[in-house]
Image (spheres, coloured by chain):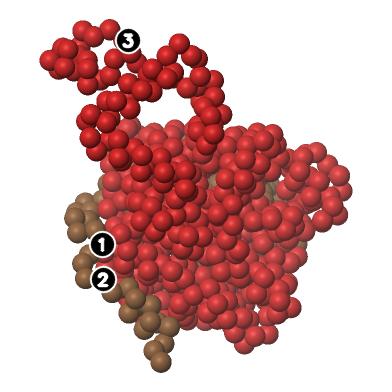
Amino acid sequence: MSSSREQIFQSLQRKDRPFPSAEAPSTYQHMVPLRDFSPEELEAVFIENAQNAACIVHQPASQEEAINTLLELVGEDKIISSWEPGQIPLDGLETALEQAGIARVGEDAMVQVGVTGVDAALAATGSLVLSSGNGRYRAASLLPPVHVAVVSRSQITEDLEPWLAKQRTSGLEAFRQASNIVLITGPSRTADIAMQLVMGMHGPRELHIILVDDAV
Amino acid sequence: MEVQSNNFIPAARIAIHDADLQTAVAMGTDSGFDKRQAVMFADGKDHGEAIRRQAAAIKRNALNSLPDLLEQAEAAMQENGIEVLWAVDAAEANRLVLEIARQHNVRSVVKSKSMVTEEIGLNQTLESDSIDVLETDLGEFIVQLGEETPSHIVIPIVHKTKESIRQLLIEKADMPPTDDTDEMARFARNYLRQRFLDADMGISGGNFVIAETGSLCLVSNEGNIRLVTSQPKVHVALVGIEKVIPTVEDYATLTQVLPRSATGQTMTVYTHMINGPRREDEADGPEHVYVIFVDNGRSKIYTSDYCEALACIRCGACLNGCPVYKVTGGHAYGWVYPGPIGAVLTPLFVGLENAAPLPYASSLCGMCKEVCPVIIDIPRMLLDLRYDLVRMGYTSLDWNLGMKAYAFGGASPRLFSWAGKAAELATKGFKLNSLPGPLAGWTDYRRMPTFAAKSFHQLWNETDGDLEDVDEQ
């Protein structure tokens, strides 16, 4: 008796190709037509689309101010769910949290604020790319009702296509090594009840993006 | 799932007279349709159409080498640490899930929306083995509470009004009474959250599988798929064998054309690429990831003249655009897949004899093809299925007699012209509001036109084929 696998491959055999004239596209058009953006324009497009997706974008003037923005968002809480500080582009984050008496956990269902960095930010759709890995907890961007993502300006790229092209250039090995990659476009939502939009269905209700210059 | 597609006409008749259903379905489908139009062509008609052609080429190119891609995907997934299993049919898919559940001592399961699991009736199987299964997509959760089935591929409870959802949540889940949509959703969030954290196993479907990287790709707005695929220690994905695509570039197009067509979003809130279980240096994520490739009739469709139906990416745009779906809703179609693509897929999956009315559940207006992101020629397939039905003898006696009479009369120009003359004379001077006997069905919903005084043949002969100046007679 042949295995189910063999049986399926056996029954998939055809004499001909089902679509003789179909080929892979020789060049791929991008979903959003690529335009030549200066870094400033790209940043503006990212901010606009992130806001359209219901993100709240903060643009502090300095790294110190960025930490203050983060601490304000944490508020009275003394515990946050967070990526390892080394994975977040904020200088002196660890010290600042210690001084404020805020403890960090990777995963805790009751925590109100989750803090992460990102791998990249996609301007055309206002999306954040987050891959899981050492010190990069999935729960931090998922379980708390408020997610704060720190994005460094140099991480902004045009779109999904160029980001994937970059992965291909580096051999797709790192891409495959990440067990879980998620593009996050705004806070969690549903419109299942009578097409009425509700934010914060199963994931965060608020998504804050703190935009910073590269950490030193 | 039990097939009730032969009951389409009586079920549709009930739906047409259900005022709540009419309101709810019209609101959902119109909203989906309008949003899709706006975002699909945000960069111009030409660009939107070029993207559709690209997506269509990608899926057809993938189907051209489906067996090779499946092998490639399997090998890549295994390298990534995913266990790959194969299910010939529903029974085997259910058995495999049960075996995995037993192996990991699973007592409770959280599930995200998956049409394949509806196909195979997975929930019933698990429940009959005393495993607790909870649907976590808000719409599917409400479907499960109401012991119903989803009526739309993307909006499972498009047929329900807010009032009926409220009633259900109060009666079945002890929700404190509220009229506020926000509070209703918040209640469901809290109800489900602890279950996510306690669940032993998560079950998902799969929107795409990238063969070259072995990635399982999913889309979601609520975040329940993130919870299902990262909280429990075991994640099982059931994926139709037609979901495999070659490259990450193909993926970039398809995962963006899907939400544009489905809900008019440029990107779903969560767009997932899952490459395996948690790595050694990771603190969260599942310890085991299984992918079950499900055939359940797909290979039969693959080798038939209806292979194109396997290009479907389940966006639901054809449902939202269809004048028939809009008035019947999804349940009338009697199985898992409703709407135009359902009218094609259902007979192919369950047998034409078990879904004979469905190929006729279309006005052939062509809107389904017009809005399809991968340009599936649904009207062509509906016509071919009608042809198959006639060949198999699945037509009514009235229909056969009428067609026989027409074939007899149409075969001779003289008979044809006499018949026309006779009809004209017989109805001259009368305004026929309803036709007699078996023909009455036609005039129940239409006005009977009067016959023209002169036939087309006569006019043609009189004017030597120069018909432009002939007045309407």
Distance in Å between CA atoms under marks 1 and 3: 50 Å
Foreground: B107 or A117? B107
Label number found at residue A18: 1
> How far across and how far down the image is residue A111, in percent?
73, 60
Distance in Å between CA atoms under marks 3 and 2: 56 Å
Query: Vertical placement of B210 versus B355: above or below?
Result: below
| Crowd rating for badge 1 (residues with CA inside 10 Å; few <14, some 14–19, many 20+) | many
**Residue A33 figure quarter:** top left
> How far across and how far down the image is residue A125, in percent?
44, 44
The residue that label 3 is drawn on is B473
Confirm whether circles 2 and 1 share one chain. yes
Q: In percent of the image, x 55 and y 54: which residue is there?
A: B6
Q: In percent of the image, x 47 and y 43: which residue is there?
A: B398
Q: Quadrant of the N terminus of chain B?
A: bottom right
Where disc 3 sits, the SS reads loop
**Residue B38 figure quarter:** top left
Query: Vertical placement of B53 versus B215: above or below?
Result: above
Disc 3 marks a residue whose amino acid type is Gln
Query: Vertical placement of A75 versus B365: above or below?
Result: below
Q: In percent of the image, x 57 and y 81: which residue is there?
A: B95
| Crowd rating for badge 3 (residues with CA inside 10 Å; few <14, some 14–19, many 20+) | few
Foreground: A102 or B371? B371
What chain is tagged by disc 3?
B
**Chain painted in red in the figure:** B
**Chain painted in brown in the figure:** A
Do callouts 2 and 1 mark residues in contact (Cβ within 8 Å)? Answer: yes
Q: Quadrant of the C terminus of chain B?
A: top left
